[in-house]
Image: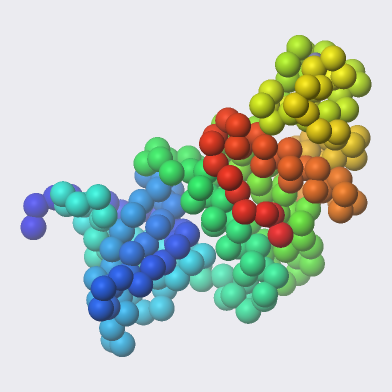
Amino acid sequence: MAGKTLKTEAVVLRSIRYGEADRILHLYSKTRGRIGAIAKGARKPKSRFGGRLEPFFRLDLLLHEGRSDLLTVTSVSTLDGYPRLRSSGPALNAGARACDAVLRLLDSAEPNPHAYNLLCRYLAILDDSAQERAASLETALAFRLKLALAAGFAPELATCAHCGESEHLSGFSGAAGGVVCPSCEAGSFPLSEEAHSFMVAAIGSPLAEAPQAEERALRQVERAVGETLEHHAHVQLRSAA
Ligand SMILES: [Zn+2]
């Protein structure tokens, strides 16, 4: 068989039934960013892949790279299956939205260790039953902000994204890519001080320590991140929760 072998660690973002017994996998890998792969015979009862080719599994993989766009999975071992995440409805939902955001925002074959580690960190927090706020909207939005930062699309939060003014930053413009002052507010929406502070604090804190905020402020944060990514990364994310 011509081609080469790739060994990498990766998270399964999506797993699709294919043909009679195969699976197509969307993987986010540590060393090569996004990878599409096929696992032949994965749905046969005695498949050597077992049940590990499901979303959220963090795997060590050997893949064969031939002429096709899809790599072929040749061997798999589990690094983490996040079993507690799988038994909680809110955690499953949050994990699915996180994988979907990675799928939409990071589609290149360039490795992005910040994004990879952030995804693994979030899955680990969702899997940790001691983390009561793991599946909260706050943590979901902190993940989204950090993911935007890792992908190179962090909103400008320190000064007006249009003119550089540093005071009275009471609006947010997705087109400008950040907070804006009253002179530059065309096309912006009002951003409360609470929402602004949440974004600054969430980017500056560990994911497990996302700041708290009122629902209204959090919805403004979601809109701010969403509009920034729509304008600058040309992707639309599903709602955060
Ligand atoms: Zn301005």
Q: Can residue 91 be seen in this view?
A: yes
**At 54% from the left edge and 55% from the top edge, which residue is drawn?**
100
Asked if 202 appears above or below 95 in the picture, the reply is above
Asked if 136 appears above or below 178 in the picture, the reply is below
Q: In this view, does 201 lie to the left or right of 241?
A: right
Q: Residue furthest bottom?
A: 45
Name the image quarter holding the N terminus: bottom left
Q: Indicate how the structure is coloured in the image.
A: rainbow
Q: Which of 21 and 8 is in front in this view?
A: 21
Quarter of the view holding residue 109: top left
Q: Position of residue 7 (x, y in %)?
A: 30, 54
Q: Nearer the viewer, residue 73 or 163?
A: 163
Asked if 166 appears above or below 90 in the picture, the reply is above
Q: Please count the marks in the image.
A: 0
Q: Nearer the viewer, residue 119 or 15?
A: 15
Name the image quarter holding the C terminus: bottom right
Q: Is residue 121 visible?
A: no
**At 78% from the left edge and 28% from the top edge, which residue is drawn?**
188
Asked if 227 appears above or below 218 in the picture, the reply is above
Q: Position of residue 101 (x, y in %)?
A: 57, 51
Q: Position of residue 55 (x, y in %)?
A: 48, 67
**At 26% from the left edge and 55% from the top edge, which residue is drawn?**
70
Q: Nearer the viewer, residue 163 or 28?
A: 163
**At 9% from the left edge and 52% from the top edge, which residue is drawn?**
2
Q: Position of residue 96 (x, y in %)?
A: 58, 63
Ligand 1 visible in quadrant: top right
Q: Residue furthest left?
A: 1
Q: In this view, does 95 lie to the left or right of 21?
A: right
